[in-house]
Every structure is written in structure tokens, then in C-alpha cells.
Amino acid sequence: MNIGWVWANLGQIGTLFVTHVWLSIIPTIIGLVVAIPLGWWAHRSRRGGALIIGTAGLLYTIPSLALFVLLPAILGTRILDPLNIIIALTVYTIALLVRVVADGLGSVPPDTVASAEAMGYRGWQRLLLVEIPVAVPVIVAGLRVAIVSNVSIVTMAALIGIAQLGTLFTQGFQLRLFVPILTGIVLCVVLAVIFDQLLVWIGRIATPWRRKDVPA
């Protein structure tokens, strides 16, 4: 194993890692923002809810590589434009999180909703200040799946020339070196673990009432 390859290409690896980070996290954030109102609608509407969740499920079945190739023709962007990857992963994130948000809101006890209404909370105010905070554990669990999935799917973009950690896989194949491939795998796993633990931490911060009392 030529470990020297890693040190000789450390700058490139760092750039690929940073690019992989923002290509993974931006679609996750945008997808969550869009999925919240769609999930709320799916939760509130029986007929519309089935249609929304069903459509979201179908979107996730689209092969990622096919979507990466089709989006430039649909959007009029260049094939190497990272915007194509961001939009594709946003679609996948929404597809994953719509059901999660709907299920999270469905897990809110009716007594909690009734109490919020009695206190004067209405519509979006009740959703943002009462229902979503209570649904945070379910939503965070879905986000953990979405971000790890995005970290993995981003690597497919290397096949159309978008530089990120997946580029190390194609370089390793072209150079017939195992080290670049192993480096890409390890960094993808590390990034997924970092994102996952960050979301766990955010979930704990956002739900202080769920923390167990620590003995003095």
C-alpha cells in the first residue's frame, strides 16, 4: 500500500472533503425546510396526505446517476454544475423527510395540541412553537438517515466529473491504486459519523425535557 500517495495529495484530498461536506449538508437543510410544510399538509389532509407521501416515495426510486444526467437538460445547467447535485439530493431529502415529518407530527399527543389551542396558539404558530418541538426526536431520526444517505449518494457524482470524495474512487480505479479508494471510503464514513453525531447533539439540545436527571 502506497501511503505516500496520501501525503503527496493531501491538499487535493482536503479540497474534495470540503466540497463533499457542502454538497451533502446544503441539500439536507433545504430538503428539511421544504419537507416541513409538505409533511404538515400530509399530516393534516387524509386524501392529500396519501398522495404527497406516495409521490415522495416514488421520487426516491429515481436512480441518482440518471437524475444527475437528466437535470442539466431540464434546468439548462452545465453537466458539471454542482447545482445539479444539490437539486437532486434535495429531491431525495424531501422524499425521505416528508413521511418522517408527517409521522413526527402524528406522534404529538392530542392533549398537547389541545392545550396549545387553549393557550391561543393557532396554525403555523402552533406548528412551529409546539408541534415541531415535540416531534423533534422523530424528525432528527429521519434527518440522520437523510444526511448519511446524502453523503453516500454524492460519491456517484464522480462518474459525471463532479469533484468530491467519490473522485478518489475513480482515481484509484484509473491508477490501479487501492490507497485512494480506501482513503475515500474512510473519509466518507468519518463524515457520515460526524454528521450523525452532530444531529444527535442538536436533538438533545432541542429537547431538554427528555434529558435524564444526572445525580449530583
Image: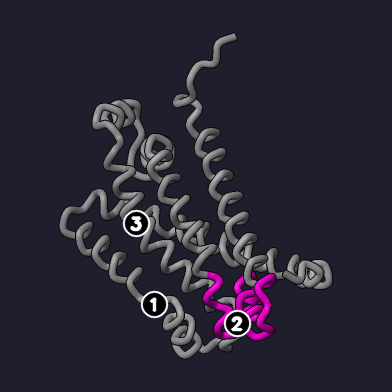
Q: What element does badge 1 sit on?
A: loop
The C terminus: image quadrant:
top right
The amino acid pointed to by label 1 is: Pro
Which residue lies most toward the front here?
A: 1
The amino acid pointed to by label 3 is: Val
The amino acid pointed to by label 2 is: Asp
As drawn, is 188 to the left or to the right of 5? left
Q: What element does badge 3 sit on?
A: helix
Residue drawn at x 49%, y 24% as measured from the top left? 211
Q: CA distance from mark 1 to mark 2?
A: 19 Å
Classed neighbour count for the residue bearing mark 2: other residues with Cα under 10 Å, few (<14), some (14–19), many (≥20): few
Q: What element does badge 2 sit on?
A: loop
Mark positioned earlier in the residue sequence (3 or 1): 1
Q: Which mark is residue 63?
A: 1
As drawn, is 4 to the left or to the right of 21? right
Mark positioned earlier in the residue sequence (1 or 2): 1
Name the residue tied to disc 2: 81
Name the residue tied to disc 3: 98
Give residue 76's position: percent from left, percent from top.
Answer: 51, 89
Classed neighbour count for the residue bearing mark 3: other residues with Cα under 10 Å, few (<14), some (14–19), many (≥20): many
Q: Are marks 2 and 3 in contact (CB under 8 Å)?
A: no
Give residue 18's position: percent from left, percent from top.
Answer: 70, 64
Give the label, 3 or 1, closer to the camera.
1
Mark positioned earlier in the residue sequence (2 or 3): 2
The residue lying toward the viewer, choosing from 177 and 54, is 177
The residue range painted magenta reads 154-180
Q: Main secondary structure of the magenta part?
A: helix
Give residue 98's position: percent from left, percent from top.
Answer: 34, 56
Q: Is residue 127 visible?
A: yes
Q: Is 177 contained in the magenta span? A: yes
Classed neighbour count for the residue bearing mark 1: other residues with Cα under 10 Å, few (<14), some (14–19), many (≥20): few
